[in-house]
Amino acid sequence: MSAHHDELNPLEAAEARFDLAAEALNLNEGICKILRTPTKEVTIYIPVELDDGRIEVFTGYRVQHSIARGPAKGGIRYAPDVTLDEVRALASWMTWKCAVVNIPYGGGKGGVICDPTILSQRELERITRRYTAEMIDVIGPELDVPAPDMGTNQQTMAWIMDTYSMHKRHTVTAVVTGKPLNLGGSRGRTEATGRGCLIVTLEALKRFKINPKEAKVVVQGFGNVGGQAARLMSAAGMRVVSIVEWDGAVHNANGLDIEALMKHRNETGSITDFAGAENVDKEEALYLDCDVLVPAAKENVITSANAHKIRAKIICEGANGPTTAPADPVLKQNGIFVIPDILANAGGVTVSYFEWVQDRQGYFWNESLVNERLEELMVASFNDVVSYAEKHGVDNRTAAYMLAIDRVAFTIQLRGLYA
């Protein structure tokens, strides 16, 4: 049995969850129409001279889903399979993510159809600078603040900041977040998403009365989010018993040495054949009996075809959209406590918000202050979502969407319609 193709479409998933929450809220039909429709969509074509002299034309997108609560906020991904539907879905998720943690942003997302693994640094720089120049009237500290995503990084953000600043004739650090520290980046940003996962997982464990030092954790993904989450959870005393990656999985019932596994992966290019663990099947590892499962790799990992096999008590969604909409009722029926992606991985956008605030103030915080403010905001948001779920008799994901949609809808109604 495999998941139906429509189930794997991110836009279909985003709309299905929106509809469910809007119906539970008894949301006004007109407001529904506004919230289902992006504010702006831009498609551009980027001619670039490649290193071998050939000219290639790349397609780029930027979607601003909502700017009701503040500037649009969201990453730019470089990948060969970027689609406008995917960018639309991710932009809407950013609207709900920013609203659920109650920061003053709307949602945006961008993408360029390219394969960064086969492009040189110079080629990536040309694509990035041309993308920025074409989007110069669309992005900005008060309009739309991009950030890194799949296939982009701190260097990409530095190029965007520089190109934008050259056009504006003065240095504008607040145009993007996720920048290097020397260009106005924030301390604590690299591990912010993983730290956010740790914070909400600790809150969930309290509800189950599970001592963190007795909690068994399985993490899928060992990149920035999964790797940092695993490292921080291990440092907090949890037993990370399995790490699952694209090329295999490793398992140690007594807990993995995460720092040693990171070193092994850096040296060999893979987590497999690690001396401190045994290799296990990457599919079966997801179904291990554990307290916490952290899907932090990609979307559509838990579907209607395999949701019944999940044996975790808590799922903390480090990735965007790791669970499909039809899988939600299966997890609910099985009593699994889901910390939905728009809450679980909001640590990244929260510290991006802190970076933007610091850039605009021209005053930078130490790392302990960043982490302290992140914890305060994530704990409050977790409690808001869980209380909302209990009050309305819905699962956590529906509660998170209801809470976020309610906040955005309330703002739109207060502002009224400009005509």
Image (cartoon, rainbow, N blue to C red):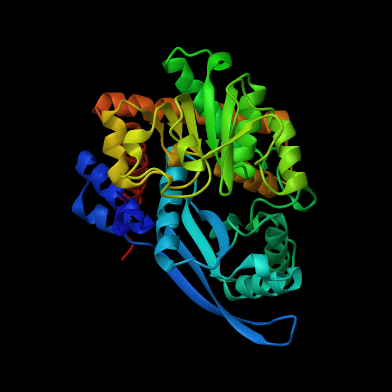
The residue under the point 41% across, 37% down is 340
Residue 172 showing in the rendered view:
no
Q: Nearer the viewer, residue 103 or 301?
A: 301
Quadrant including the C terminus: bottom left
Q: Quadrant of residue 174?
A: bottom right
Q: Nearer the viewer, residue 366 or 331?
A: 331
Please tell me how many numbered marks the rendered image carries.
0
The percent coordinates of residue 154 (x first, y second) are 70, 55
Residue 111 showing in the rendered view:
yes
The residue under the point 47% across, 47% down is 320
The percent coordinates of residue 113 (x first, y second) are 54, 71
Left or right of 180? Residue 79 is: left
The percent coordinates of residue 379 (x first, y second) are 50, 26
Left or right of 9? Residue 333 is: left
Considering only vertical position in the picture, is 252 above or below 223? above
Q: Residue furthest bottom?
A: 54
The residue under the point 68% across, 44% down is 358
Q: Nearer the viewer, residue 281 or 121?
A: 281
Q: Nearer the viewer, residue 284 or 64?
A: 284
Q: Residue furthest right?
A: 182
Left or right of 88? Residue 214 is: right
The percent coordinates of residue 412 (x first, y second) are 34, 50
